[in-house]
Structure formats: structure tokens, C-alpha cells
Amino acid sequence: MAQQLAIIVLVDIGNALETNTLEGNTYLFDNMKLHGSHGQGTGDLVTAIHGAYWRDGSQATEQVLNWLPYSLGSIPPTVPRGYEADRARQSDELALAELDAITAKAGAAGADPAAELTEIRKAAGTRVKTTRRTRGRLSGQKILDVTGQVVTDATAAYSYPGPVITDIYGQAVDEKIMYPAAYGSPDLVTDGWYWSATVDSSRPGTYAYTMRIQLHKLVQRGSETLWEPVNLTCESKLMITSEPKRNGFSGAGLGWLPIAPPAAASQPPPSAVPQPPPPAAGPQHGPATPNA
């Protein structure tokens, strides 16, 4: 049966957009550290893939890779699915309440509607315009910071949308070592899809592959605020090893498990062993004896 291996792609989106590169801004992890992977937590991860073959040399098992991209310094992906929409609705309700308060005291001495309207605009926040390239979860959402508060100034610190892997290619794909594809998933954290690949573990060696990752940068065009896609790439490697199929319990070859024979049941002492009853007395059959 194929084993499932996970590769976490953690991106420092703010620095990556500022320097226009993922080099030095990507941190990769997998769950094979104890099995030979090295470069954990860096951009130079080499994922160990353990292949196995039967006695006749045929491939005994495959490996399946799953890539999970996350953002460093953004709202955690584990918050409820409608978190951004809830925060946007709360900011709208607050702005409406303050607008009602201004209306109630309109014309009062000392009232400064202009200053109060400015505060209302801050409370309402800024909603990002929907474009053809930013449909879906980014559509019409307000800008939030990492604490979940709405942001009105595009130059202020804000939470970036999560990175999206759009393609996986390179040596490992060209040489048909792995077969990557995007798959649908009910997992809402990954927006309903994720990247996975089956690895041919019968060909030992080290193979490089490249991930194309799409980030989103907040830009101001006139009076409109937009998420602009930015496509960058980063590289990683697979290290495939191969060994004979073996018993996972004993470490030996396939066969019977080395289970010791059961201990002989202890025998009870002779005095405790029940003896069969003596035969019952019956008529004696022998030669007839004359009477005296």
C-alpha cells in the first residue's frame, strides 16, 4: 500500500514580495526527518523516499506526496471558514451605528461631521475589488491585519492571502519519477483542492523539482484596491532509496513472525489427578461347586 508523505511549504509572503523572490523566504518541512530527510526548515529540503522491491526485483510499494502551502505572518488557516466575512459584517454594523449617532446629533453646537465621518470610514475598512483573476475566497473581502482588525490604509501591515501552488515541474517530472496533479478535496483550509504526486520508488537517486507559487500583492489603482497576482518559483529535491521488502516488526525478510512457542501448561501433581473408580463387584463365573 502506498504511504502518504506531507511536505509543508511555509512562505514569508511579505519579504518574498518585497524582494521578488522565494529564495530565503521559503521554509520546507516533511514528516520523514527520522528516515533520512535533511534540510528541514530551510529552502533546501531533500525529502527521503523509501522504495522497496520484492525478491524478484519488482517494485513492492509506491509513495504519495502531498504539498500543503501556508503563509508566515498571516491569519492562521485554522480559523473558521467565514472568519473574514464575519469581521467585515461586524465593521459594517459598527459604521452604521456611528452613522446613526451622527444623524441623531446633527445640528448640535460643536459637532464636526467631517471628523466623525472620517472615523466611520476607518471603522468600515476597505473592501478589495473583485477581478477575474481574484475570484473565490478573495472576492470582495475587506483587508484585515493578523489580529483580525479591518485595515483602511494599504500601506499598513495587513494579512496576506495564503500562497497557492499552481504547477510542479522539473527534472523529477520530466524523467517520470513522479506524476503530480491538482486534486479536489473537501478540506476547506486548502480551498477545496491540493497538489499531490505518486512517486516511482523503483529508481534510486536524487531528483530536483520546481514549484510555481502564486502570491498576492495589495495595490492601489486610482480609487480601487486590488489583489495583484505575483508568480514566483522555488526548488526542492527527492532522494529515493531502494531496499528489499522486509518485515516491519522484526526487520528481517518476509515470512513468519518470530513468535516464541507457547509455554507448556504446568501439569498438576499426581495426587491432584482424579483416579477412575474401581470396577463394580459382580457375580463370579467359575466351575460349579457341589453342595456338601
Image (cartoon, rainbow, N blue to C red):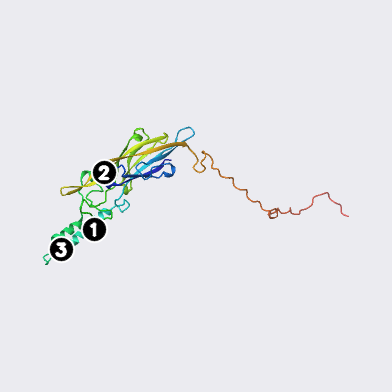
Specify the quadrant of the image occupied by residue 199. Answer: top left
Residue linked to disc 2: 19
Q: Residue furthest bottom?
A: 109
Query: Could you tell me residue 239's position as x and y percent?
Result: 40, 38
Q: Are marks 2 and 3 in contact (CB under 8 Å)?
A: no
Query: How many numbered marks does the figure carry?
Result: 3
Query: Could you tell me residue 66's position as x and y percent?
Result: 36, 43
Amino acid at dot 3: Ile
**Upstream in sequence: badge 1 or badge 3:** 1
Say which mark, if any, is on residue 108: none
Q: CA distance from mark 2 to mark 1?
A: 35 Å
Quadrant holding the C terminus: bottom right
Residue linked to disc 1: 90
Residue linked to disc 3: 102
Amino acid at dot 2: Thr
Query: Could you tell me residue 164's position as x and y percent?
Result: 29, 44
- Disc 2, SS: helix
Amino acid at dot 1: Gln
**Upstream in sequence: badge 2 or badge 3:** 2
